[in-house]
Image (cartoon, coloured by chain):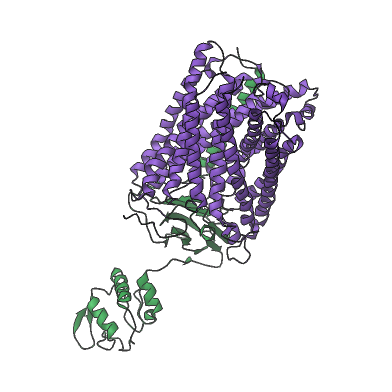
Amino acid sequence: MAINVLERRALMGAIAFVAVSLGLIAYATWGLGINVPTCIPLGTKPFDQASVTKHDGKNYEVHFVARMWAFEPAVLRVPTGSTLDIYAVTKDVTHGFLIAGTNVNLMLVPGAVANGRVHFSKPGIYNIVCHEYCGKGHQAMNAQIEVSDQIADYSVEGIPASAGLKLLDEKGCLACHTVDGSARIGPTFKGAWGTTLHLADGSTRTFDAALFEQKIHDPTAFAVTGYPPVMPPIPLTDDEIKQIEAYLEGLQN
Amino acid sequence: MELQKNLERIILIELLVPLTLFIFGAYHGVMQVMYQSGVIRATSFAGIDYYQGLTAHGVINAIVLTTFFAVALGAAVVSYELKSRVSIAGATLALILMLLGAVMAAAMIFMGKASVLYTFYPPLMAHPLFYVGLALFIVGSWVPFWTWIPVYIRWRKENPGRKTPMGVVGIFATFIVWQLATLPVAFEVLAQLLPWSLGWTPGVNVMLSRTLFWFFGHPLVYFWLLPTYVLYYTMLPNLAGGKLFSDFAGRFTFMTLILLSCPLGLHHQFADPGISTSSKGFQGVLTLMVAIPSLLTAFTLAASLELAARGRGGKGLFGWWKNLPYFDPQVWLFPYLFCGLVIFLFGGITGIVNASYSMNNVVHNTAWIPAHFHLTVGGPVFLGILGGSLLLITGLLKKPVVSRTMALTVPYVWMVGTFVFSSGFFLGGLRGEPRRTNLGLTYMNPASPSYRPDWWLATHMGLLGGCIMGLAVLLYFIVLVRSLAAAPDAALAQAPFSLPTSKPYHDEDIAAVQNFTPWVAAAVLLCVVSYYAPVRDIVKNGITTAPGFRPDNPAAVSTAH
């Protein structure tokens, strides 16, 4: 016994509906280029430091780090017309990453890197919200991307520096010494660790932990040729000295 | 016929215990819209933390209430339709395991040791007893089905050539889906989460956990829906005063849902890393296929209602809609099923949005999602459970349903509530409002730098709708308690226990939908095809394991012993 003719039409109608829907999805995916996130076969450990890298023009690669209960960076400013390649990881539990008003909607799962691309053609404030429950502070976990006609290049807030750099800043060291290679009253720290220093008294010494600690404990003991002997005493604990040394060592290259 | 006395007692416990727990579940539903709209701006109220209450809301309403109802309805339908005795030992064992599991999980939630929501995603870590409770509950729910299989096989031998009663087809479809779907989540809980929460393993592969969970999580929604489909296909046409338009449609729907329940859970993970777009796309296509049995169901039920209405004197192309028993106290159950269907229409349409692959980018994990599923599990499923429970409880106790006018008002109030609630949440979701978030502290707090005034309307529609839904629940419990307190009816006591089962109008005899075996085999095969690639990717890509975290502490739980 065959099925009723009206019912057969309803069944055909349902199949046609599914076929049309699938056609529209295919058009959105390949025609409009809107896709969902895929595998990133890194084969390496996910990064743990947030960063922004400028490629060419207005193309930026942004590494977001999520943790309970903040995003790093917390604020990212880019010029209108920028395209962002976003990579995002979590340091602890699963977090969500939705840039409202865009097609970037990612899950940040421990052990994996999430990836999305977004182009900002209009200026404005784009809110990033964590939309996966991540513990008691979940409702306070958000960030912003500010897209503006007024700026030429990017800037960020809320990427915490390493402990050593933070100490150099807090203790006032950066008033005289830079970490980017430029000269101020004192010599730059960039690339200095492990090199040979020419001292004002004519001798030479290697920039190492022993030299650094002597200089901290007795700032007038020696001075580098070409720089005035004006370094003040800086009160640092042994732990703080270790943290700064670790940072300076990392500044070698 | 009469059911076995012991079975009747077990069914009553299986209905009344979860309904009692549901008072807490519903209470925190109302509390949630208060927190989210900023009426309450606090981490906790009356001793219950927001996320703790949210966990209770999800676990009690979506897992405990729904599973107990499926088991209770299943026992009644199988025993009544097959005119057979079922194993009391099996039913008792199931009841003990499920009660123990539910109480254990609920205790951990109320002690604040398991505020991990009903999805319990690692690496958020709950107390080991929460996982033990879940495992006991799931394993317990398997047992009754195992005892019904030999009963059914015997019935088929004794009734050669007879079609399996539609209700039994539906109940077996429900539990075949459940059995298939719960194996991976049982593995997740017992092999991954439990040893990890006990400190026996240092970490858990979170991507694997999520994938196992959603292998279960999507068929879970069909497991919720299928008992309600049983009510729709077996009772709705009869309650309307007519017949089921097509017998084939019911069998086809149940069989295709066996086939298409499990192999498409990845559409909940469209936004996840570590799974290729081809795996996601394949399961996305399968997901849309579910629209075929759903649309056929919509057609068949509408045709059955039209048939019934015309039998009651309905005329005209659309005029017959007026001739249905919307407010007839004699068939108070009709509006529970009818309103559920109306709600489900919108639940289905919005579900197609979620399932539509790239469109999911707009709505994933936003308030849109709870807006959608409060029109499915919170619509037809919930109203089916309320109506079905009242039918079974009063039927088994031989008591009349008291305050019938109030009883039939409940689904209409609920329907208005869900529409207002979900409209608000849809709106918020499209504006990026996250789901399951204590918005009142930050996003709905003018004093916070995160304040989002553009979510005000959305959250306040949620507040209004949620309160109306709360009112419907209150009315329901008044009816239930008054009916329980009523004296048994002498006339009812004479009549044997019966279910208001419909007869078919077109009774087609199509062999392809009369046998479970090929459908179950195809379902298992499709699961393997569908999940081989993503699981291989997750294992092969060397995703590292994660230590556990408590919801209140950003430092990892130390697993050193």
The residue at the far top in this view is B160
Residue B328 lies in quadrant: top right
Toward the viewer: B465 or B523? B465
Apparent side of residue A195 relative to residue B551 in the rendered image (left or right): left
- Residue B245 versus residue B57 in the image, above or below: above
Toward the viewer: A9 or B398? B398
Residue B501 percent coordinates (x, y): 65, 22
State whether residue B389 appears in this view.
yes
Letter of the chain in green: A
Apparent side of residue B140 relative to residue B21 in the rendered image (left or right): left
Residue B455 percent coordinates (x, y): 64, 56
- Residue B89 versus residue B161 in the image, above or below: below
Quadrant where the C terminus of chain B is found in the figure: bottom left
Residue B496 percent coordinates (x, y): 65, 21
Toward the viewer: B187 or B311? B187
Q: Residue at x 33, y 80 (%)?
A: A236
The residue at the far left in this view is A203
State whether residue B266 appears in this view.
no
- Residue A114 versus residue B304 in the image, above or below: below
Residue B350 lies in quadrant: top right
Quadrant where the N terminus of chain B is found in the figure: top right
Q: Tag count in the figure? A: 0
Residue B129 percent coordinates (x, y): 43, 46
Letter of the chain in purple: B
